[in-house]
Image (cartoon, coloured by chain):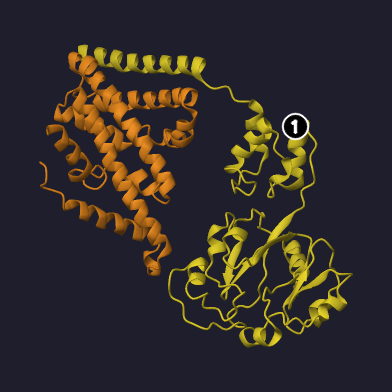
Chain colours: A yellow, B orange
């Protein structure tokens, strides 16, 4: 009988002693955190994407409560989230414009030529560092998926050697924008439907030599676009996203077929969901 | 000299991860990025050293006098180490916030890690004194950190490489771990 009693007492005693020590420590040593921080953390989307510039949602919540940081930094949460937090904290919220990332290139492996066979590290920066990349076009998407790997919500897929962003999943955290060695990815307003999917600043003949769907700088689109919504940057047409471009005619008129509208695609996905 | 041999033995020859196969879970779990591996290594070193000290006292002053060390060791060690880690967590948060920010999230992960428990049990099995126990705990953790950091470095490289499809991910990691263990076998016989 005796070993049973001593061992029971012993384990029970250790358990009680540790519990007491922990209870005392919790009571006298624990750090008091502002309870609002937890509430705000719960209101944030919890994706921990880091798009706001802080280390995750909890860190952003701490900065919001303690340092009065701007509420509009959270792209995934958007205006609703900012408004909810503003109401909770009794502060004024600004509007968050919903944005999405877009890859400004449409030269996939069918349309654009590759001038070399690259079989090094599967990484765009590495390919770019190897004699300027294997793509014939020195502006276009290399297609080695650095952006897809860095995306926290798997919104980017490499289709036929070209990165494509799924608008419905993108949370506009901007990680792909930073990682693309050719700076092809931009954050644009989600409402914009017509884009010039080319970034080549080369002259027309040079573009045509390497890509079937490049901007040749013909300026036709600027004539059809609504009041200055497409501007020329050298030999490249660029959409001015501060203006609203709705005239679908530019899509049909573009001889390079690099102006695309994803409005129809959006409607399809909306109908499906 | 004796202490030096103890350190060499725990770090290289009888490496906790690669030749005793303790602590495999964090070894595979947190070895994707050097920064997290560093945090984990720090936390393990901290906890293992503390745990060695505390469990030695427990064994010497409570279990051995009552003759309970034969069958209550594992249970009480787990209990005490878990409580200790919680306590460290609270104390650290209060008095050393930067340290807590660096190690905090790893502490709960290793409360009852088998490497930590293994160090404590081995200490008792070898019949080490107090100082030797603490030293052994620390150097075992050092060995763990070494193995973890080497492995993480390798995995970071492999991440960028292009292995055959069937080997991608965990498979190639396990193969790497095996080869690393094999490499550490080269130290065997160096110290008893």
Q: Which residue is mark 1?
A: A88
Residue A250 at what x, y percent from top left? 82, 77
In this picture, residue B157 sits left or right of residue A250: left
Residue at left 16%, top 53%? B186
Instruction: Report x, y in % for residue A119.
Output: 43, 75
Q: Give the total number of marks visible in the rendering.
A: 1
Going 79% across and 40% down the picture, which residue do you hit?
A93
Quick one: B73 or A199, which is closer to the camera? A199
Q: Is residue B65 visible?
A: yes
On-image quarter of the C terminus of chain A = bottom right
Residue pictured at 79% horizontal, 43% vertical:
A94
Res B160 quadrant in image: bottom left
Q: Is residue A67 left or right of residue B34?
A: right
What chain is tagged by disc 1? Answer: A
- B121 lies above or below A210: above
**Along the viewing direction, whichever of A149 and B111 lies nearer the viewer:** A149
Quarter of the image with the N terminus of chain A in it: top left
Residue B125 horizontal/vertical position (percent): 16, 30
- Residue A169 in the image: above or below residue A30: below
Q: Relative to A8, say whether A119 is above or below.
A: below
| Image position of A132 (left or right of A35) | left
- Few, some or many residues within 10 Å of mark 1 (<14, 14–19, 20+): few
The residue positioned 49% from the left and 34% from the top of the image is B101
């Amino acid at each position: 009988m005796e070993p049973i009693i001593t061992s029971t007492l012993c384990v029970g005693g250790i358990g009680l002693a540790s519990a007491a020590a922990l209870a005392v420590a919790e009571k006298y040593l624990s750090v008091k955190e502002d309870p609002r921080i937890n509430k705000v953390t719960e209101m944030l989307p919890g994706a921990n994407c880091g798009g706001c510039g802080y280390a995750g949602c909890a860190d952003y919540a701490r900065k919001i409560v303690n340092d009065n940081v701007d509420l509009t930094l959270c792209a995934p949460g958007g205006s609703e989230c900012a408004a909810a937090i503003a109401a909770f904290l009794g502060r004024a919220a600004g509007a968050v414009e919903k944005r999405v990332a877009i890859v400004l290139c449409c030269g996939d492996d069918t349309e654009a030529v590759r001038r070399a066979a690259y079989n090094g590290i599967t990484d765009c920066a590495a390919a770019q560092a190897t004699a300027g990349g294997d793509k014939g076009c020195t502006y276009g998407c290399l297609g080695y998926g650095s952006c897809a790997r860095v995306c926290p919500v798997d919104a980017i897929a490499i289709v036929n050697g070209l990165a494509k962003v799924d608008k419905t999943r993108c949370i506009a955290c901007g990680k792909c924008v930073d990682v693309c060695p050719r700076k092809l990815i931009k954050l644009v307003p989600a409402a914009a439907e017509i884009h010039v999917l080319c970034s080549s600043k080369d002259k027309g003949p040079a573009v045509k030599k390497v890509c079937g769907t490049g901007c040749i700088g013909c300026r036709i689109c600027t004539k059809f676009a609504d009041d200055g919504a497409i501007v020329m940057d050298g030999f490249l047409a660029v959409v001015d996203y501060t203006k609203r471009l709705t005239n679908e005619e530019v899509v049909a008129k573009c001889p390079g077929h690099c102006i695309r509208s994803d409005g129809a695609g959006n409607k399809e996905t909306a109908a499906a969901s | 000299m004796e202490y030096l041999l103890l350190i060499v033995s725990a770090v290289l020859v009888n490496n906790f991860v690669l030749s005793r196969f303790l602590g495999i879970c964090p070894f595979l779990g947190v070895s994707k990025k050097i920064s997290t591996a560093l945090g984990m290594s720090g936390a393990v070193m901290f906890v293992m050293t503390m745990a060695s000290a505390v469990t030695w006292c427990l064994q010497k002053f409570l279990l051995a006098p009552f003759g309970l060390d034969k069958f209550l060791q594992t249970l009480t060690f787990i209990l005490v180490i878990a409580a200790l880690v919680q306590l460290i967590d609270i104390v650290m948060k209060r008095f050393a916030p930067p340290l807590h920010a660096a190690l905090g999230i790893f502490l709960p992960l290793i409360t009852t890690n088998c490497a930590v428990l293994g160090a404590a049990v081995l200490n008792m099995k070898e019949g080490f004194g107090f100082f030797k126990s603490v030293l052994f705990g620390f150097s075992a953790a050092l060995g763990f950190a070494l193995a973890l950091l080497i492995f993480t470095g390798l995995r970071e490289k492999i991440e960028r490489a292009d292995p055959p499809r069937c080997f991608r991910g965990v498979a190639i990691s396990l193969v790497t771990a095996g080869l690393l263990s094999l490499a550490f076998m080269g130290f065997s016989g160096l110290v008893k």
